Image (cartoon, coloured by chain):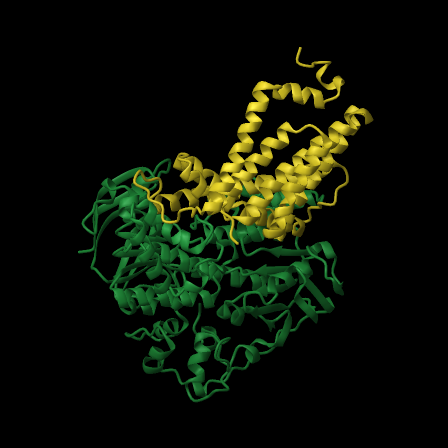
Amino acid sequence: MTVNPAVLFAWVLLIVSLSLIMSSLFAVLILLIVASVPAVFADLKRYGTYMKFSMLSALLIFVFNIVLLGMGSLMFSLIMVLRLLAITSAFAVFSSATEFDDIVLIMDSLKIPQKSVFSIALSMRFFPVLVGDAEQIRESMVARGMSFEEKGVKNKLKARLPILSSMVNLSLDRAINIAESLELHGFPSKKRTRWTKIDYKVRDFVMLALFAVDLLALIIYLLTYQSFYELLAAAMPATILGGYHGN
Amino acid sequence: MEIELMNFGFKYANTDKFALRALDLKIESGEFVLIVGRSGSGKSTFLRAINSLIPNFYGGEYLGKILVGGKNPACTPTRDMARVVGTVLQDPENQILMSTVEREIAFGLENAGLQEETITRRVEEALDLLDIADIRKRKIVSLSGGEKQKVAIAAAMARHPRILVLDEPTSQLDPKSAESILAIVRRLNEDLGLTVLLVEHRVKNTMHLADRILVFDNARVIGDGEPRLIAEQLDFDALGIGYPPVARVAKYQGLRHIPLTVKEAQKHLHVELDKLRITEKARKHGKTAIEAKNLKFSYNKRAVINNLSFKLYENEVFGIIGRNGSGKSTLAKLIAGIIKPVRGKIIYKVPKDEIGLVFQNPNLHIIGNSVLEDIAYTLRAKGKKDVESKSRKVMKYLGIEHLAARNPMDLSGGEKLLFAMATVLVFNPKILILDEPTRGLSWNMKKKLVALVRDYAEHGTVILISHDIELMARLADRVALMSQGKFALVGRRRDMLTSTLTFSTQLNKLAQRSGDAESKILIEEDLGVPI
């Protein structure tokens, strides 16, 4: 069964919203599970690649929190990390189950300006190319005697700086080629039509309606019960916000 | 008249020299025009003026007037010109904007405001025209360079242009993919009467296809006419364009009719090939430089190098040929120590850090903002002394000292190759690996490369990976044919590159048809023709 990308996109928005609002460990954990299970139906390899980097970032955030704020922030750090993983997992599922061109279709149907849509779509289309560039540049530098096995974060970053410099050079060159090609493809165009449209079935409308109701309920809850910052403050140890509790 | 240029000239903004000047030309509908000339002679500028990227995308001083299909590109937006002129650019990767094949073909049609049904029809016909219906749902990142160029041509053709302009469309491709693309272009020209303007360095594969050749030099057209006649009138070697080998021999013999293919040479080239005997002394090589034993390497559990053993010697040029994906570049990285074998080992008889690899994409060697800075970077990375003097010395050796202050991104293809070589040769490697060095190079740069490699092999080992059989025939002492991660065959060049249908030079193919299938003739120099 193919997933309607618009429904999937709405699901991602819902997961992101819920992640930002939920403050209990149990709730965020459930959310992470909900955000990860659909990966089974997506391109698992792509999902794994995205999540590998997210797991590393999450681990770093967790360690930094503990080091800087002490063991008292253990629960707060854990919730933060799970929240981050839930959000990235939802995006990873979306990216692994849809094509970048689908994002163009969704944004097009939301009447987002063409130039913004294509800026995002092109950056996603060329992301794997840039990753390939970075690896090839690293190899060319190793061939010229550069070592990337330095110890320590500072040295590792310093060793990788030339890769960034080289990537900027390549990207600038690529940007000119892409701009030239966009021009030759007749972009931007005021009379642009759409060949492929998202095909909505009854079940898609049902799902969208469900997500919309969920989101609406959350908004009402937020407006009537507590502000987001109060929730955030409640989730944080007092030392971080200097005792701020919304008073 | 399809295209007419009237006293056309153009100078890019922020430059001093005109890229094109005083151009008067007329091109008839349905002509196949090959455009040749050395780098910077004005070829790409000419195409940009036709498809209206000049002056819409590239600003500057615009002189004279152009008419293309009745439209004036100077007053027509590029998106409107795209309905008259389809364009295919050099780089297969960067010109494709969407993620899947059919959506890429549809993209330009959507921008043209066509209705859904019309787009569907055009997409289907473009897929059939290029015979790529089987890859319609494939992601662009998963396609080969040749397939990407077919998609780019399909996207251009879907707009039903009257003219197709192609700017070095095969320069990034292997010979097989290049031939496939050129065959398609020829078919489009013959079957549909499409006017074709093709900029190419591979004259051996293109001159016979064209009805007409335009020779650009120093911002002007200095030759215009039937390719065989212009090849006879002008000295293509002196102009840095080069000839197909059979044409070079005919030119040297002073023939009026210059053959461009083996078939034409059979009729017109009167060399008594079967009476020629090549007596060549094998060059003496030195001691063992590298010994590989049972090498194995895998990507994603797929064996790319498979139980490979070999020896390389000092003062040897070792050539490696083979299909794409046969493991050539992976082997280069293994030898250079960039990746490690999963099994087996390489025994280095030379210091391991004195192995240099020049990548097939010279852009990968660019880090800084000047040629000198980048060359010096290698020495600094290796902790060497006298960085600047050594950097300048290698630039002088390669003849690029005048480029010291230039930004490497601004160099031409040939200059970039020399720059990339300089970033490696500066630490004087004992083993130099060149991966596809001639891709997209003009004849004069190839000639320079041949001289440099011959000189380098006097005191070092050179591993040459290339699809360019003519280059192999000139340089390699031994040649290995790589297939499925192994050397299927290894032997001396005159044994490996003769008497085969695919891995022979043009002159050897001619020799094979001249009654002596055992002929060892490979290159023009064998017939006493200097290059």
Q: Which quarter of the picture shows residue A13?
A: top right
A100, above or below B59, in the image: below
Place of residue A222 in the rendered image (x, y in percent of width and height, measured from the top left)? 59, 22
B354, above or below A220, in the image: below
Quarter of the image with the C terminus of chain A in it: top right
Q: Which quarter of the picture shows residue B196?
A: bottom left
Residue lying at 33% horizontally and 38% vertically, measured from the top left = B59
> In this figure, what is the number of numbered marks?
0
The answer to whether residue B257 is seen in the rendering is yes
Q: Colour of chain B?
A: green
From the viewer's side, name the closer residue of B456 and B13: B13
Q: Colour of chain A?
A: yellow
Residue furthest to the top: A247
B365, above or below B37, in the image: above
The answer to whether residue B511 is left or right of residue A233 is left
The answer to whether residue B390 is seen in the rendering is no
Place of residue B39 in the rendered image (x, y in percent of width and height, measured from the top left)? 40, 52
Place of residue A178 in the rendered image (x, y in percent of width and height, measured from the top left)? 43, 44
Residue furthest to the right: A71
From the viewer's side, name the closer residue of B486 and B10: B486
B182, above or below B407, in the image: below
Residue lying at 76% horizontally and 17% vertically, measured from the top left = A239
From the viewer's side, name the closer residue of B311 and A1: A1
Q: Which quarter of the picture shows residue B229?
A: bottom left
The answer to whether residue B252 is left or right of residue B489 is left
From the viewer's side, name the closer residue of B278 and A125: A125
Place of residue B332 in the rendered image (x, y in percent of width and height, measured from the top left)? 64, 61
